[in-house]
Each structure stands twice: as C-alpha cells, then as structure tokens.
Image (cartoon, coloured by chain):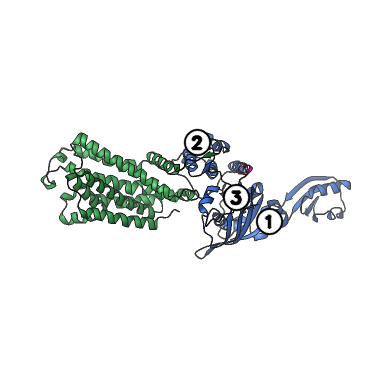
Chain colours: A blue, B green
Amino acid sequence: MAVIEVEHLRKIYGSVVAVDDVSFSVEAGEIFGVLGPNGAGKTTAVEALPGLREPDSGRVRVLGLDPRVDRQELRQRVGVQLQESALPAKLRVGEALELYRSFYRESADVAGLVDTLGLADKRDAYFQNLSGGQKQRLFIALAMIGRPEVVVLDELTTGLDPQARRDTWAFVEAIRARGVTVVLVTHYMEEAERLCDRVVLIDRGTVVATGTPSGLAALHGGGTRVRLRPSRAFDETLLTRLPGVSSIERQGEHVVVSGSGDIVADVVQALAAAGVRAGDVRTESASLEDAFIALAGHPIDDADGGDAKR
Amino acid sequence: MTARTKAAAGGAFRRLVITEARLAWREPIGLVWGVGMPVLLVIIFGSIPAFQEPLPGLGGGTLFDAYVPILMVIALSMLAFMGIPYPLANYRELGVLRRMSTTPVPPSRLLAAQLVVNLVMAAVAFVLIVVIGMAAFGLKLPAQPLGFLLAITLGAGCLFSLGLCVAAFARTGRAAVAMGQGLFFPLAFFAGLWFPQAQMPDLLRGISQATPTGAAAQALTESFAGQFPSAAPLLLLTAYSVAFAAVAIHWFRWE
C-alpha cells in the first residue's frame, strides 16, 4: 500500500525552478531515500509532504490525505526532522521532549525513547552542550514523540563524524522496525545504500531514476568486476559463455571479468571445473554513485550550484 | 518508545509557558533589565535625601513620587524592547519557530507564551516597586486604582506591541538587541528618566507626551496623583497599540 504518493510535483521560487517534475511513491514500512546533490530540490520536494511548502502544481497524498487540506491532521501523524533547525540553547533534553510531547494527541513514553536513542544520561543536559550526534538523536526523538506513522528525516547525518553517522543509521533502522515509514533525504550515497529499501535519484529538480540501491547500481552503474590471478592460462570462452559475463580483459598476470549480477561464484566455479585455481580474487561492485554518474552525467558532489557539505 | 500515553488536552500552552518561564530564568535578560534595574533604581532614588523633599514644581509631591510611575514605564520598556524581541528573533534565526510549525501546535502559541511570561515579569516589577516604595520610602498607593490599572494595561499593550514590531523586523537575535536599545534610550528619555515631564520645558513636554512612553508615564503619574488619567494619553496609547499590533502582525515571519 502506498503511504505517500507524489505526482508531477512542481515548485518555483521567483524565477528559480526548485522542483521541476518529481513523482514517487513510498510503500508502508519502507525506508525510502530521496537522493541527489545539494540544491537538487530534495528538501523542497519532501517539505511538501507535511504541508510545509505548497507546491505550484502536482498532486501529493500522504496517508491518503491532501497536505493542503488536511495539514492539521497530517501534523499529528507525520514526524519531521528539518535540515536546519535548533532548540533554545538552555532548554534541557528532558524538557524539550516533555514540551513536544504535549503537542500531540498521542505520545510515546519519554523514558523509553531516551533509552532507545542513548540519551538517558543526557536528560538534564542543555541543548547547547550536546554533541552533533546527540542533537540529531534528540531531533529523531522529537520527530518520534507523537507516535507518527511517517517520519521525514532531512540530511540527518550531515556534519556528523563516521561513528556518529553509523550510530544514527542504527536508530533509523530501529524506527522502521516499529513499522514506521521513513523518508530519508540525503546526498550520501553510502547512507542510501546502507539504509534504503528504495531510492529516488533527483537531479536539477527532476527524477533521474527510481529503484532499489543495488538494482540501480547493477542496471546503470556498469555491473560487477571480478579481478583474479589464474594459476595457468585458460580459454577465455570458458568465461564469456557464462550468463551475466560481458567481457574479459587481461592485465599482466591478472584477469578482469566484467558482468552484471552475482558472477563471482560462477566465474570461480567455471575455472575450478577446468582445473584453473583463481587466486587473489577481488570483486568490485558498481555503486549507486556509479549509477548516479551514469544517469546524471556528473558526480553527486559536483552539481551546478551544489556545494558539497562534506 | 512503545508505551502509548495520552497527552493532556490543552496542556500544550501551559507547557509552553512553563518552558518559556524557565528559559527566561536561565537567560535572565528581561529579569535583570526589566525587573532588577527598575527596582534597584527605586531603592537608589528612595535613598537620596533630596528626592524625598516636596517640590512646588511637582504640586507638592516629591521627586521620588514623580519617579515611581516613570520607573514602571522603564520596566515595561525594558521587557518590551529586550525581553520580547530577543528570544523571538533568536528562535526564528535558529529555526525553532520553523521546527514548531511541523507540529500540531502553531508557533503563534510560542509567541503568546512569551507575552504571558513578560507580562508576569512586568507584574512582579510593579508589585516590587510599590511594596518597596511603600515599606521604605513613604510611597502611597495610586489614588485612582482603576485609572492606574487602565493606564498600565494600555501602556503594556502599546509597548509590548512595539516590542513585537522589533521582533518582526529583526532578522537575528543580535539585530533585535541593537534595535531594542536604539528604541529604548530615546523612549526612556521621553518617559522622563533623565528628568520628569513636570520639569521639562513646555515644548519638550508636549513632544514627550506624544510618544508611547511619555503618554504612558503621563497617564500613570495622573493616576498616582489622584486624577483619573486624561483622555489624551489613553486614546493615544490605544491608537499606538492598534497600529503597532497591526504592523507586527503584518510583518512577522515564522522563518
């Protein structure tokens, strides 16, 4: 069942087309990634979901409701973490949670929430004294406090160190484990590959592709490459006739086999059957990044006007 | 995260007021300048012997009596120009208001909670000024309590609306502080902080009484002296309140 449906969304600021034509749908219980360079229109697109932005044209439905008409109801049922927001410097973690809890019809248990997010010993800390990772965990907690059915997380891990980023990913997975649908906006390919069930790639206000991260990588990213050192010379047709293998290239002592899908096992087995031992095997799977470059014609950190925040 | 509990109905505004009160206590700009400073000036002025001598130019009242209503206007001005605009502009700058607009409770409630907290601080300042003045320095309660209440209510409405205009126009917390100070000093002068209106030359007094603080000080002074405040300052304060509120509502941005 589609929880979110966006069709031909368009949003213009003055003469700048922030979102030209974006369509996607999100199924219940999935982690859906909205992926693209900075300035691609990701934030504008997702801000239309809880009714924070009014699209100039297009159709948006969230939980079967129209954000333009049912804003108030959606605010009860959609939790949001915004890219650029903060809390008063001298508000304590526990106070912020109690305050936001009072905003909703239904609310989660504060003690359970701070435990899950590893903030139990920070309940009395001022917001200004939290680390970047702790602040983001608090924002996840605030997005979850109203027991939402959908949460929108915008650039959740931008500016975090790698450890804090991995910790935060675990919390996003914990949210999904509760049956909450997650919309994750990011420009980190690695984050999308690790977390998202499906992604929409957006570049310059339009959708370039939609699919699973591994599916998009395999389809558009140039497939898989297996590099190995055979124990002796062999007939190349041994491998080229395998399904999925597209080419073979010799590099000195090594052989590089290119193809799509899971060709590693087939290649090694075919060689072994012919009495050739494959040593030093390395595989290189095409990444979502490769797919993005193939589709958009430029790397994700290198878009016009998109200053990468890394 | 699993326990399902019901949020208390209507508890959101109460919770907002409690939260804003805590924050006002922890970053006590309004408390120090809007309550502490006027009360301290009451004690200092009351302790100067020359301020306790009846002066013919003041209709037989003392300089201390003349300063009590002025210091009340100063308390209101400090809260209006420091206590209200700084947190609101700061919240907008930080994205606090925008974050709140994603919840079922609109950020206008946060603004209302700010006003409640500042009104309570103003009431605390008035009570301290009157109690200390009466206990230590021979101050008498306003002879016209109803007129006093009307004057103080209109004065608070007018100055707090002006404070909201500052919050509407200032893009950052720092800008709000700068604009608030820029308004405070001339308006404190017109209220009579440097010398009361009774001691001003006629032209200057006329100008003063046309300003928000001067009109408020005039109405309060009259109510202390035993007259019902005259129509001119009351009407002027009402007109200012409406105009400032309209400007603030039209220009205020949540993000």
- Where is residue B113 shown, x and y percent of the image? 39, 45
Q: In the rendered structure, which disc, 1 or 2, sits on the residue that comes first in sequence? A: 2
Q: Is residue B183 magenta?
A: no
SS class, disc 2: loop
Spatial CA distance of label 2 from label 3 is: 26 Å
- Label 1 vs label 3, nearer the camera: 3
Front residue of A287 and B26 = B26
Instruction: Specify start and end residues of the magenta stretch as a single range.
Output: A172-178
Disc 1 marks which amino acid? Ala
Q: Do marks 2 and 3 share a chain? A: yes
Q: In this view, does A302 lie to the left or right of A245?
A: left
Main structural element of the magenta stretch: helix, strand or loop?
helix
Q: Which residue position is annotated with label 3?
A: A184
Q: Position of residue B108 (x, y in %)?
A: 42, 50
Identify the image quadrant of residue A291: bottom right
Q: Please state which amino acid type lies under the numbered disc 3.
A: Leu
The answer to whether residue B208 is seen in the rendering is no
Q: Circle 1 marks a residue in which chain? A: A
Disc 3 secondary structure class: strand
Reply yes or no: does residue A177 show up in magenta. Answer: yes
Q: Quadrant of the N terminus of chain B?
A: top right
Q: Do the residues labelled 1 and 2 touch (CB within 8 Å)?
A: no
- The vertical placement of A241 against A103, above or below, is below
Q: Which of marks 1 and 3 is nearer the N terminus?
A: 3
Foreground tag (1 vs 2): 2
Q: Which residue is drawn at 28% across and 56% down?
A: B239
Q: Which residue lies furthest to the left in this view?
A: B56
List the residue tagged with mark 1: A291
Asked if badges 1 and 2 are on one and the same chain, I answer: yes
Q: Disc 1 to disc 3, how far (Cα)?
A: 19 Å
Q: Which amino acid does label 2 sit on?
A: Arg
- Seen at 35% across and 57% down, the residue is B246
